[in-house]
Image: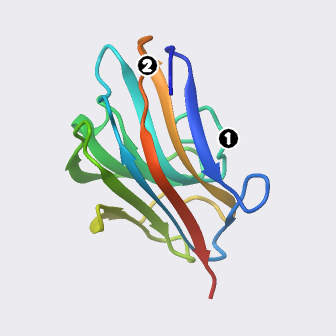
Amino acid sequence: NNTSSTSGAYIYHAKTISTISYFGSAHIYTQSNIIFPTLSDGSQTYTYECILTASPTSASVSANNSCGIRYSSGINSGNFQGYTRSSTGAETVVDLGVTVAATTPYTLRVEINKARNTVRFYINGKAKGLVTGNMPSAGVMAARNAILKSVGTSLRNVVIQTMTSGAIYP
């Protein structure tokens, strides 16, 4: 939940304090079943992310060394967007072709391969895009869902019904 223009909330999975695995050591995935009760708009703006990241407790949107799916009214015309972000902050993005609708259930899945050269994005079980540039550096990572409010003071939230993550080692 969010109640002010500068707040946010997140939930993450970790094997240790803040990691489930290491980028480059396994095929890693995260999947979440979510619902947006109210959409982001110009007067009540928030960004939601379902991501694999080296910084699961970061209060910022799209931290470096991350890959994920994000949504906000001001990003990609309100469509889900897949992205990768390197350690230097360089991004590669892909339009996942799904316009977000209020009260609609979505299953979001992000997968990065062990070689760290491909990230795949799935919505409701269907492949929607992939990215092959600006990959996270090898190192610790965790899965995170976050909602970060940037404009407005009215309550906005995302219902996270389930969140799973895992690492498949060779």
Looking at the image, residue 79 sits to the left or right of residue 49; the answer is: left
Secondary structure type for disc 2: loop
Extreme residue in the front direction:
161
Q: Mark 2, residues whose alpha carbon is within 10 Å: few (<14), some, or many (≥20)?
A: few
Residue 42, quarter of the rendered image: top left
Mark 2 and mark 1 residues within 8 Å of each other at the beta carbon: no
- Residue 159 marker: none
Q: Position of residue 75 (x, y in %)?
A: 32, 35
Where does the C terminus fall, quadrant-wise?
A: bottom right
The residue under the point 57% across, 77% down is 114
Q: Residue furthest right?
A: 17
Residue 115 screen position, x and y as percent = 56, 77
What is the crowding at mark 1: few (fewer than 14 residues within 10 Å), some, or many (at least 20)?
Answer: some
Residue drawn at (25%, 36%), measured in percent from left and top? 102
* Amino acid at dot 2: Leu
Q: How is the image coloured?
A: rainbow
Question: Which dot, 2 or 1, sits closer to the camera?
Answer: 2
Q: How many marks?
A: 2
Kind of residue sitting beneath label 1: Thr
28 or 67: which is nearer to us?
A: 28
Judging by the rendered image, the residue that carries numbered circle 1 is 57
Q: At 42% from the left edge and 40% from the top edge, which residue is drawn?
A: 159
Q: Is residue 120 above or below residue 84?
A: below
Q: Secondary structure at mark 1?
A: loop
3D distance between C-alphas at marks 2 and 1: 21 Å
Give the residue pinned by disc 2. Answer: 155
User: Residue 124: where, in percent of width, then height?
Assistant: 29, 61
